[in-house]
Image: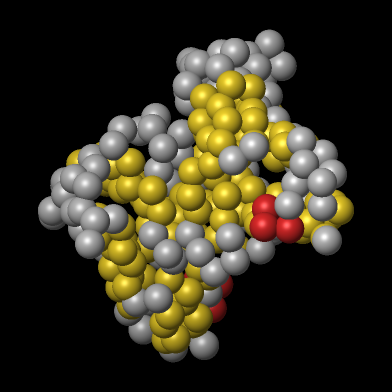
Amino acid sequence: DAGITQSPRYKITETGRQVTLMCHQTWSHSYMFWYRQDLGHGLRLIYYSAAADITDKGEVPDGYVVSRSKTENFPLTLESATRSQTSVYFCASSYRRNTEAFFGQGTRLTVV
Amino acid sequence: GNSVTQMEGPVTLSEEAFLTINCTYTATGYPSLFWYVQYPGEGLQLLLKATKADDKGSNKGFEATYRKETTSFHLEKGSVQVSDSAVYFCALQLIFGQGTTLQVKP
């Protein structure tokens, strides 16, 4: 199906474990983004990518790693999960930097 | 740098009431401005957009005008419905406002 998909939708992990959230888009959009949504903070940009092999930090990158070897995939890895990383994570893509973004359904991550 | 400031919620209205959600921005250049809506348990989806000064974006009865002189992009709707209950986000390129929760009561 065309669109942007995130997996898993829900994840519970333990403090200190590595976890990877997946994001896949079928539009061949150049830009892809990772945001986290927390009560009282709205959406905060973690990382973004302008093209394959080009990534850049957003507002809150600490504790996260991204890669983009293929245009359609943009995984987000928490190298050693902490409780403060409990959040809802959204992946998005856009054709250009200044065009509308298309969002996935989100991944609800709980770190215990 | 660029920033977006959005009025805090929650906003509670009765059905058929008039809605305004304020959004102001700081930007270099002339970026496009967007309003997104998030229904419970879902991702964000584009509600409307404006790409240059004095443009008016509209969709589903919602409107917003790109005002360069006041650096604003306020969202309005003349008559809200219960189905409009959601969280609304003002956005400028990669930057989103904090979101405003709207609850419409029958």
The x, y position of residue B40, in whole percent, is 59, 66
Give the vertical position of A41 relative to A21 (above or below). above
Structure colour scheme = secondary structure
The x, y position of residue A101, in whole percent, is 40, 43
Res. A79 in view:
no
Residue at horizontal 41 percent and vertical 37 percent from the top: A100
Q: Nearer the viewer, residue B46 or A16?
A: B46
Q: How many marks?
A: 0
Position of A30 with respect to A6 (left or right) is left
Residue at horizontal 39 percent and vertical 30 percent from the top: A98
Q: Nearer the viewer, residue A6 or A56?
A: A6
Q: Nearer the viewer, residue B1 or A98?
A: A98
Residue at horizontal 72 percent and vertical 34 percent from the top: B76
Quadrant showing the N terminus of chain A: bottom left
Position of B99 with respect to B55 (left or right) is right
Residue at horizontal 70 percent and vertical 30 percent from the top: B74
Position of B40 with respect to A1 (left or right) is right
Give the vertical position of A93 relative to B49 (above or below). below
The x, y position of residue B53, in whole percent, is 56, 13
Task: Name which quarter of the figure residue B18 lies in.
Answer: top right
The x, y position of residue B46, in whole percent, is 49, 43
Residue at the extreme left = A70
Res. A21 in view:
yes
Give the vertical position of A34 relative to A55 (above or below). below
